[in-house]
Image: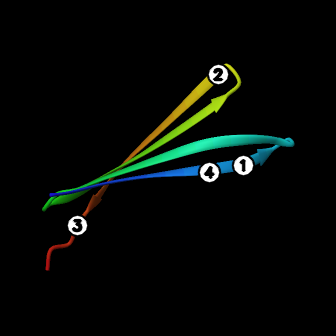
Amino acid sequence: MIFQTRKRKLIYLFHQHQIQVYLLEIELVHISHQLKIMYLHHKDQNQEYYFIQEQRVALTIN
């Protein structure tokens, strides 16, 4: 079982405002399937937005 975590900081320019977005990518690789969770965190002024995308990918074992 392999567990990988990557965090990337993305900066967008939206209507002349800098928006900092944190992308937390968690990969859990099992012998039969792969679970990939995309965690997007966006904090704008006094509001916070959370986007979670879960993706299951079947792995081919040779």
Circle 1 is placed at which residue position? Answer: 12
In the rendered structure, which amino acid carries the disc numbered 4? Leu
- Mark 1 / mark 2, whichever is N-terminal: 1
Decide: marks 2, 3 in contact (CB < 8 A)?
Answer: no
Taking the image as shown, residue 41 lies to the left or right of residue 32, namely right
- Mark 2 / mark 3, whichever is N-terminal: 2
Look at the picture and state if 27 lies above or below 21.
Answer: below
The percent position of residue 16, horizontal first and vertical second, equals: 86, 43
Circle 3 is placed at which residue position? Answer: 59
Q: Secondary structure at mark 3?
A: loop
Q: Quadrant of residue 1?
A: bottom left
Q: Secondary structure at mark 2?
A: strand
Q: Nearer the viewer, mark 2 or mark 3?
A: 2
Q: CA distance from mark 3 to mark 1?
A: 34 Å
Circle 2 is placed at which residue position? Answer: 47
Decide: marks 1, 2 in contact (CB < 8 A)?
Answer: no
Display colour scheme: rainbow
**Residue at point 13%, 62% (across, down):** 31
Closer to the camera, 39 or 4? 4
Circle 4 is placed at which residue position? Answer: 10
- Mark 4 / mark 3, whichever is N-terminal: 4
